């Protein structure tokens, strides 16, 4: 695939029909790219693929990769290295093919086997908690994306983000683990605080505690984001007294980052 082809519409293949892949596929299809197909295994993932990309055929991964100019790997980050290496071992990657993964903690290093076969590696993570529905399409327009790529092809990754309606922010390869930690911390605290506060209200008989707190929580978060960089007003000691969870708490096999951070 030459530079002229990359500047136009691409044949897009999506590996993984979790909450992230179909949404990004739909966003890029809305920008004019052609969806070649999507891989989906479980009944739930097939239903999601059908709902978000009704015209896209469900294909096996090797066929999907061979037919695509842009491949999105939206799989759990623990599965990503083996998937990339396996496709390289079978000679599936195509020279000049764009390969984009959505794992927050990985840069382009994990795509080295694909790059050695001539593919162009891109790491793009949207800082958004996905529902896997069309609701996410409008939210993409309010989202920032972490972008990591070799300097010569960085504009390609940035352009794809803009086409999805987002704002690209360049994250250095060595900073991806710290980036993932920041995302995980924000996610874990937010979910824990909401669950705990709504539980307390429900316990004293408040009906629809989520609705009751919605304006408060949105305004508090908006104000905190406006003051980003200032000392946090979050009283961690109070959370401990109330039994609140912190990032990293929980079962040993739970990394605390949530399914969407793992690209599921």
Image (cartoon, rainbow, N blue to C red):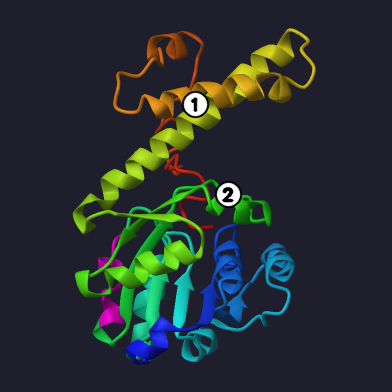
Q: Provide residue 215's location: percent of width, then percent of height.
A: 64, 23
260 part of magenta stretch: no
Above or below, comparing residue 30 to residue 68 in the picture: above
Q: Is residue 115 above or below residue 258?
A: below
Which is nearer the N-term, disc 1 or disc 2?
Answer: 2
* Residue at (52, 73) in percent of width and height: 15
The numbered dot on residue 221 is 1
Magenta-colored span: 107-115
Q: Residue at x 48, y 85 (%)?
A: 65
Kindly state the secondary structure of the residue where label 2 is placed: helix
- Name which residue lies at 57% across and 27% down: 218
Q: Residues within 10 Å of mark 1 (few under 14, many from 20)?
A: few
Image location of residue 131, percent across then percent down: 63, 50
Closer to the camera, 82 or 55? 55
Residue named by callout 2: 139
Secondary structure, mark 1, is helix
For the residue pair 109 and 4, the one nearer the viewer reads as 4
Residue at x 22%, y 70% (from the top left corner): 150
Instruction: Please state if 149 lies on the left or on the right of 75 as rendered.
Output: left
> Toward the viewer: 43 or 162?
162
Residue 135 can be seen, yes or no: yes
Q: Please identify the quadrant where the C terminus is shown.
A: bottom right
- Would you say the magenta stretch is mainly helix, strand or loop? helix
Q: CA distance from mark 1 to mark 2?
A: 16 Å
Give the quarter of the image for residue 119. bottom left
Please provide percent x and percent y for residue 63.
53, 89
């Amino acid at each position: 695939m030459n530079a002229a082809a990359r500047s136009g519409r691409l044949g897009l293949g999506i590996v993984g029909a979790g909450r992230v892949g179909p949404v990004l596929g739909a966003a890029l299809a809305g920008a004019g790219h052609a969806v070649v197909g999507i891989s989906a295994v479980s009944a739930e993932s097939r239903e999601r693929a059908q709902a978000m990309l009704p015209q896209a055929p469900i294909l096996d991964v090797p066929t999907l990769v061979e037919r695509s100019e842009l491949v999105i790997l939206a799989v759990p980050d623990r599965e990503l290295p083996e998937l990339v290496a396996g496709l390289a071992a079978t000679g599936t990657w195509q020279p000049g093919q764009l390969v984009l993964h959505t794992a927050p903690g990985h840069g382009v290093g994990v795509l080295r086997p694909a790059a050695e076969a001539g593919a162009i590696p891109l790491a793009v993570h949207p800082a958004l908690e996905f529902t896997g529905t069309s609701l996410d399409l409008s939210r993409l327009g309010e989202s920032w994306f972490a972008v990591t790529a070799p300097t010569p092809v960085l504009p390609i990754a940035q352009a794809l983000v803009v086409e999805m309606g987002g704002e690209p922010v360049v994250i250095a390869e060595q900073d991806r683990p710290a980036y993932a930690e920041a995302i995980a911390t924000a996610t874990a605290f937010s979910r824990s605080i909401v669950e705990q506060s709504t539980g307390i209200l429900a316990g004293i008989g408040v009906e629809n505690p989520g609705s009751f707190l919605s304006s408060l929580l949105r305004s508090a978060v908006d104000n905190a984001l406006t003051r980003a960089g200032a000392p946090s007003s979050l009283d961690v000691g109070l959370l401990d007294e109330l039994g609140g969870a912190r990032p990293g708490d929980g079962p040993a096999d739970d990394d605390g980052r949530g399914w969407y951070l793992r690209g599921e």
